[in-house]
Image (spheres, helix red, strand yellow):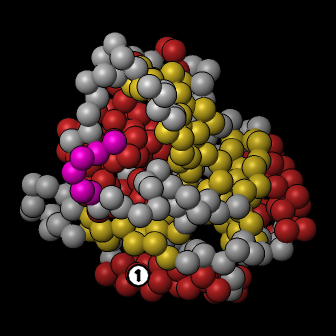
């Protein structure tokens, strides 16, 4: 009997929040994890991490790919009795705000749905990802690709969180410059600095700007994006955690970016432009701004990723 063909797919990195869309908006970026799955016959489920040189230091039982796979197998009745070998390759940098952990959970869930006997939906898969420790916005982009919004369906008093991920169009002319300073920002620290409440005026302005970000990214409207990336929900409080962050954001726009903001919880930054020729100068300006604050930074210039961990059409 012929050996079954391996399952292969890719899971993108992501930039979440996109200014005012805190916890809601995310953009998948073409910096993927590559997933290869082969059947075994000894009953073992083994994850081989080739994407991260330090992965061997982690407890394999806590690997997000493994945890996503096991949870998805339980929910969607994916048979694992014979065992699987999973190879993870890629270059999504850890601890940068580019959705590395959520991408891992999405990868495991993506394996499970490809093996599933039960029907599934993108919303069900996202609802499985978040309780594992994934971020709703990063998770939606990792699962679906492209530009996504995550709509919370459950009320605060409900014990089970429910979300609905929605894909939005994004114009092909956008280029994204990512700056990665050599500093770690823990998720707990970046959440701790946020205020427990916000003024009604800030909430209303943020809702309007979030809709403006979606419109600007769909229609390549640099002027609208420039006005709508202004954030009052999280960025003002996170600026103080990283010397040079404010200067790097300002330097990006001075060098020609339509706007710039923090990726997820940071410390990575993302700058937007529709002019490819501007990207080297934007990248250089951000690096120099961090250098002036005593920080080294590297940069990436990326496109949107129009693929995700989930198959194109649900089973």
Place of residue 130 in the rendered image (x, y in percent of width and height, measured from the top left):
30, 49
Judge left or right: residue 179 versus residue 203.
right
The residue under the point 51% across, 21% down is 48
Residue 116 on the magenta segment: yes
The residue sitting at the front extreme is 1
Query: Is 151 drawn above or below residue 55 in the view shown?
Result: below
Q: Is residue 49 visible?
A: yes
Query: Disc count in the image?
Result: 1
Dominant secondary-structure state across the stretch colored magenta: loop
Among the 4 quarters of the image, the one containing residue 41: top left
* SS at mark 1 in the image: helix
Where residue 175 appears, as percent x and y from the top left, is 74, 66
Q: Where residue 186 appears, x then y in whole percent?
A: 46, 38
* Quadrant in which the N terminus is drawn: top left
Identify the residue at horizontal 90%, vertical 68% (top origin).
277
Instruction: Reply above or below: 133 against 222.
Output: above
| Any part of residue 21 in sight | no
Q: Is residue 239 left or right of residue 291?
A: left
Q: Is residue 76 left or right of residue 215?
A: left
**Residue at the disc numbered 1:** 207
Residue at 56% x, 50% y is 12
- Taking depth in this image into account, of 273 and 196 the one nearest to the observer is 273
Residue 256 drawn above or below residue 299? below
The residue shown at (56%, 46%) is 10
Magenta highlight range: 115-120
Residue closest to the eye, 109 or 113: 113
Instruction: Please tell me whether residue 275 belongs to the stretch shown in magenta.
Output: no
């Amino acid at each position: 009997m012929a050996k079954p063909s391996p399952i292969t797919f890719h899971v993108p990195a992501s930039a979440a929040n996109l200014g005012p869309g805190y916890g809601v908006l995310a953009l998948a970026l073409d910096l993927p994890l590559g997933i290869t799955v082969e059947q075994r016959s000894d009953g073992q489920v083994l994850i081989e991490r080739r994407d991260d040189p330090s992965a061997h230091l982690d407890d394999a039982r806590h690997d997000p790919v493994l945890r996503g796979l096991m949870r998805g197998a339980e929910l969607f009745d994916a048979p694992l009795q014979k065992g699987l070998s999973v190879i993870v390759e890629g270059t999504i940098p850890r601890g940068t705000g580019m959705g590395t952990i959520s991408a891992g959970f999405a990868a495991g869930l993506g394996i499970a749905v490809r093996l599933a006997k039960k029907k599934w939906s993108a919303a069900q898969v996202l609802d499985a990802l978040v309780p594992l420790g994934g971020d709703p916005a990063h998770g939606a982009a990792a699962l679906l690709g492209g530009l996504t919004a995550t709509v919370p369906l459950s009320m605060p008093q409900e014990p089970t969180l429910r979300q609905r991920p929605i894909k939005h169009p994004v114009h092909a002319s956008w280029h994204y410059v990512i700056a990665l300073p050599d500093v770690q920002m823990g998720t707990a620290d970046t959440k701790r600095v946020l205020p427990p409440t916000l003024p009604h005026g800030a909430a209303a302005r943020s809702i309007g700007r979030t809709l403006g970000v979606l419109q600007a990214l769909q229609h390549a409207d640099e002027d609208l994006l420039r006005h709508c990336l202004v954030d009052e929900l999280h960025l003002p409080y996170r600026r103080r955690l990283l010397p040079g962050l404010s200067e790097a954001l300002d330097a990006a726009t001075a060098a020609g970016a339509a706007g710039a903001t923090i990726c997820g919880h940071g410390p990575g930054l993302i700058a937007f432009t529709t002019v490819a020729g501007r990207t080297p100068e934007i990248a250089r300006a951000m690096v120099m701004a961090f250098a002036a604050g005593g920080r080294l930074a590297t940069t990436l210039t990326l496109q949107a990723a129009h693929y995700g961990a989930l198959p194109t059409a649900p089973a």
